[in-house]
Amino acid sequence: MILRKNRSSFFQLFSTCAGNLFEHYDTALFGFLSTFLAPVIFPSKDPTTALLLTYVMIPIGMLARPVGALFFGYLGDSFGRNIALFWSLLGMGIISFFIGVFPAQISIGFLPPLFICLARMMQNFCAAGETIGGAIYLLESSSKDQHDFLSGVYGASTIGGIIMASIATSLLVYFDVVMQGWRYLYFVGVVTAVFGLLIRKDKMKNSSIKLPSRLNLKQHIQVLLSYKKTLAIIALVSGFSYVTYSISIIFLNGCIPLISSISSSSMITLSSFLLILDFILLPLFGLLSSKFSRIKLMVFSSIITVLVAVPSFFFLQGATAGTVVVIRIILMSLGAMFSAPLHAFVQGLVPKEHRYSVISFGYSLGSQLLGGPSAAISLWLFKKTGQIYLAGLYWVLLAFICSVVLIRLYRSEKKISFAHAV
């Protein structure tokens, strides 16, 4: 029995996954549209400079995520999961609306980039409350034997949002109406947010846990500091998961055309198929994790990554299309194997009363500090050494550290509770 056999469970799954899908659709949309929005945001710059400045906005916007994690983590632990999820989704919808009505006629100095930069920061601020909060609510509302599978399903909804943004942008490009129609893609996000809010209003109830006394800011920070070791573990596994996808999709898309005869357009097409594969694999690996041990699956994935990452990169030099496809499928599968039970794993490290705050903050730190720079670090290693196989060293280092930490946790499993009552 995958889900509890009642209508409420279906709406819990649907509402949380729909919110997560919308969040990743919305945040991925800017990346897919950046090439086309660059001259709109920076109308006075030459095309190359405009594109470069637009790309810079992506990591700048991400800086707001840790702050958003602190804010929505506080809301979720002090006032209820549904309160934090409601306001995070509402905030995402409002920001999408304002981006959609952004006046293209504005060309006064810093106003266009300032508007978009602030919108991106607010978008990421709100998104920090949705990604982890939805997973926490979903797993807390289900029985423990469903956690690994639902963790994979929730992860698949993340990929689903990215696929949705990719398809929507591709359709506008195909019909050559990007500049006329990009706003409608954000309005689709607004409609999706409203739909999600209506579902959550009626179906999402507070988790049946006793909320602690509401803490002030100082007490809230003290609670987080008391979980330093747990925060480090969550940041590590979240960062490694992020790096796996960053290497498989972002880095290899740009690097393979430099070391082989394969075109960039072919790499982008392959990435679309890989995302669909990942969408399928995540629930399957989640189901596999429920049959065995989630930590064993994650250890296996990280150890195999240590062993195959550098050799895989070595064979990419001058590789044929077939070789590239096989290698990228292997790397993507390793990422799905590690990430499928990730939400279930990290929730078992933190008691309910502090779960939203600790996991959200740890995840935001890991994904931004460890994961965010990974493509740039790998490219820098390749540029400095001229050897493509050395570009995988950062990934291997994180995989090795993850393996050591997870093995130590596994060995002490009888002493440390991974699953506080849910």
Image (cartoon, rainbow, N blue to C red):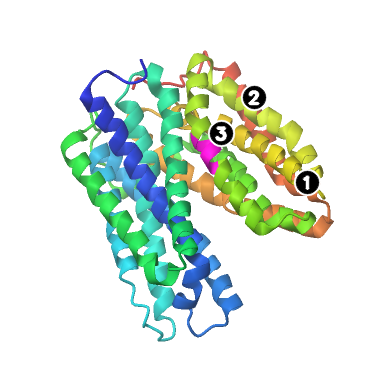
Name which quarter of the figure residue 147 lies in. top left
Q: Residue at x 57, y 82 (%)?
A: 46
* Vertical side of 376 occupied by 354: above or below: above
Residue furthest out toward the front:
175
Note whether residue 150 is visible. Answer: yes
Asked whether 227 or 152 is in front, the reply is 152
**Label for residue 336?**
3
Q: Please indicate whether residue 246 sits to the left or right of residue 359 in the image.
A: right
Which amino acid does the dot numbered 1 rest on? Answer: Thr
Q: Quadrant of residue 154?
A: top left
Within 10 Å of disc 1 (Cα), the crowding (few <14, some 14-19, many 20+) is few
Residue occupied by mark 1: 320
Magenta range is 275-279
- Please provide percent x and percent y for residue 112: 41, 77
Marks 1 & 3, CB-CB < 8 Å contact: no
Q: Nearer the viewer, residue 174 or 108?
A: 174
Q: Secondary structure at mark 3?
A: helix
Q: Nearer the viewer, mark 1 or mark 3?
A: 1
Say which mark, if any, is on residue 295: none
Does 60 sit above or below residue 67?
Answer: below
Q: Position of residue 346 (x, y in %)?
A: 46, 31
In contact (CB < 8 Å): disc 1 and disc 2: no
Q: How far is mark 1 from mark 3, CA to CA? A: 24 Å
> Within 10 Å of the Cα at label 3, are there few (<14), some (14-19), or many (20+) other Cα atoms?
many
Specify the quadrant that holds the C terminus.
top left
